[in-house]
Amino acid sequence: MNRDFWKSRWDEGRIGFHQDEVNPHLQRCWPDLGIPSGGTVFVPLCGKSRDMLWLRDQGYTVIGVEVVPRAVEAFFAENGLTATHGPHGAFSLWRSEGIDIFQGDFFDLTPDEMVGITAVYDRASLIALPPAMRQRYAAHLRAILPGGMNVLLVTMDYPQDQMEGPPFAVTEQEVATLYQDYFKIEQAGAEDILAANPRFQEQGLSQLLEKVYVLRAR
Ligand SMILES: C[S@@+](CC[C@H](N)C(=O)[O-])C[C@H]1O[C@@H](n2cnc3c(N)ncnc32)[C@H](O)[C@@H]1O
């Protein structure tokens, strides 16, 4: 799951994870996080998610990170946004009204890029990574973010022996192992989305649960 893997996925248009509509769990659960409008939301492994537009339209500044340049370019172009871009440390920083995207590797982010973040929205980011990288991901998030952060986390769970990831199955137990020392974990919904995702049915999955968690800083 390195940069070349994801670059190939984007080059070949194998981006079934991308949603044309804003994620319904985001719209339903975000208010419950209690993040005042005017805050700054970090969207790790953001792809070209339209959820960033929704967050911006709620009055937040959005900061994303995405390793594949094509994805970042597509986000701004497809949404008719004018963006500037230039070097910023290990990144190319793309800036437009209310939305900045660090084009580069999440694992190169430092606390300097995270100044002012007040919440995190993770949809299909943790589940994009294989198990060992998920531990690194959670540890790096904790290392770079300011304290006192709430997180909306949208994952998937399915019998991992029925399909190779990504997306990888992430169990409730794993969410607890990764985050419970730092967050109070609340389940905010689980929905079987297999019928709406024939590509996963074709791969032999018997169940595909989309699971939503609100992580409140301890
Ligand atoms: C499964 S997609 C999810 C994208 C987005 N969160 C969404 O909901 O559409 C994962 C994205 O993470 C990007 N990615 C993977 N590893 C990354 C890394 N180490 N740093 C930054 N982006 C990464 C991939 O290029 C891909 O666009």
Image (cartoon, grey):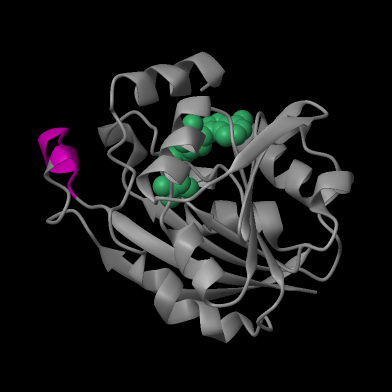
Q: Is residue 75 visible?
A: yes
Q: Which percent across, then down, holds residue 190? A: 35, 69
Residue visible at 17% across and 49% down in the picture: 197
Give the residues in magenta: 199-206
Query: Residue 200 colored magenta?
Result: yes
Q: Camera-side residue: 203 or 72?
A: 72
Residue visible at 78% across and 37% down in the picture: 109
Question: In the displayed structure, would residue 177 be above or below residue 38?
Answer: above
Q: Could you tell me which quadrant the C terminus lies in?
A: bottom right
Q: Which percent across, then down, holds residue 177? A: 66, 53
Q: Which percent across, then down, holds residue 72? A: 51, 36
Q: Quadrant of residue 217?
A: bottom right
Question: In the displayed structure, would residue 32 be above or below residue 4?
Answer: below
Q: Camera-side residue: 169 or 195?
A: 195
Question: In the displayed structure, would residue 173 be above or below residue 71?
Answer: below
Q: Camera-side residue: 5 or 94?
A: 94
On the rendered structure, is 124 left or right of 150?
left
